[in-house]
Image: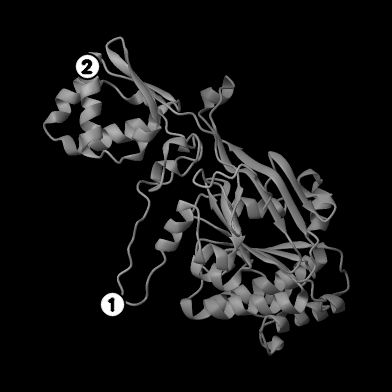
Amino acid sequence: MSTKPDTSSDTSSLVQVRDLSVHFALRGGSLARLFGRDTGTIKAVDGVNLELRPGEVVGLVGESGSGKSTLGRALLGLVPATQGSIHLRDQNVAELSRRRLREIRQVVQMVFQDPNAALNPSMQVEEAVGDALRVHGVRSTTERRTRVVEALERVGLSPVEHFLNKYPRDLSGGQKQRVVLARAIVLDPELLVADEPVSMLDMSVRAKILQLMLDLKNELGLTYVYITHDLATAKYFCDRIAIMYLGRVVEIGPAEEIFDHPRHPYTKALLAAIPEPDPDKMVPRDLPRGEIPDAAAPPLGCAFHPRCPEAVSGCGWESRDLRALVEQHWMRAGTAYDEEQDVIGDLDHLDTPATTATLGRGGSDRVRAVLDRIRAEDPHEPLWSGVTSIQPDGSGVTVRFQEADSPALRQAGGVDVACVLYPDSSSSPA
């Protein structure tokens, strides 16, 4: 296995991702499919721009369901792009045939999260690591063994003779992940996509595996896409960090800048959730309210606005937000619930995303009085800042919200952030 030259100072791009979207159609019932009815789409990745330079470690960070693993798999062509491009050097991965994708995987390899699932339990270590060489045309048994031995030595499995004939069941978790790393580097790739490579390991092993990956980066000139929900390891391992939420990059910049001066409210929330090991040190936890929205029907405007503690009028308030607010009020209303529910009526129609919401069946004045009571409970509720008018409409009222688009990335200090709190209209590619 060759040792590649240092490419950390190379400013040319290894990978350029432009306007990438990966959507998955929801599978409805048999009748829906028979009549061709639309059953919805999950926008796992939605308009992502990203650039990787040789020798760089870029972290994709976010909660489960943010799209980071799908983005990583798209880089290898494991999931098809719905639109956009992924240029690896001068080739668009999104347009390659299956045969050409196999050739690309000599340049891009993946390290999966669970080494137990990544390794075939019926293959010995030598066969598991060398199988990639066989698939890619290395027919000589002697050459395959030589390269397998070199790869295992690089990942710290020595003496190699002790491991060649072992099965995965004979190895510890850390040793299995070292075998997975050996299999990934045996083809001399340029880019490794590491999908939560240490999350399945004991705490005592994680730092050793991360240090090994950094050593491999320096020795072999590797570039990494590091996928994780753990900001602590991202700070240790990454040069740049991209924060993802519901399929979009909401903030990207140098790791040090992200940690020292977070801009996006979601980034601040992730940092606030990092555990504090000192039991005597009290850390304020201003965590987001609610849960992650449905990826099949994301919020209008900024996807984070229903949970955002810093939301303002232009964030994209809508009918579903009003329903959530009314229902939260009713949870506290006690005996007043029955009377108010008769006035407001059914709320199911508010589940269709819209910037207008019609409420009520008990007369516009009575409906308006209920809304006034809800507002008086918390005058600082940010939803009210997005309301442009409340007008009588038959036996109820129509509430109108300020329309807003999903904010694009724009420069703010040393990072790019997608947030209306940073109104710079000039957007720049990541």
Q: Quadrant of the N terminus?
A: bottom right
Residue 172 visible from this viewpoint: no
Residue wearing tag 1: 280
Query: Could you say where residue 13 lies in the image, as x and y percent from the top left?
Result: 78, 59
Q: Is residue 202 left or right of residue 76?
A: left
Q: Earlier in the sequence, mark 2 or mark 1?
A: 1
Query: Could you say where residue 231 lies in the image, as x and y percent from the top left?
Result: 50, 65
Task: Determine the secondary structure under disc 1.
Answer: loop
Real-space CA distance between mark 2 and mark 1, rounded to the nearest whole angstrom: 53 Å
Identify the residue at image location x=54%, y=34%: 405
Q: Amino acid at mark 1?
A: Asp
Q: Quadrant of residue 115?
A: bottom right
Identify the residue at image location x=70%, y=67%: 56
Q: Is residue 389 left or right of residue 424?
A: left
Residue mark closest to the camera, 2 vs 1: 2
Identify the residue at image location x=72%, y=63%: 109
Does 197 appear above or below 91? Answer: below
Residue wearing tag 2: 365
Q: Quadrant of residue 393?
A: top left
Query: Could you say where residue 83 lies in the image, as x and y percent from the top left?
Result: 70, 38
Which numbered tag is attached to residue 59? none
Q: Colour scheme used in the picture?
A: one colour
Q: Quadrant of residue 51?
A: bottom right
Does 404 appear above or below 111? Answer: above
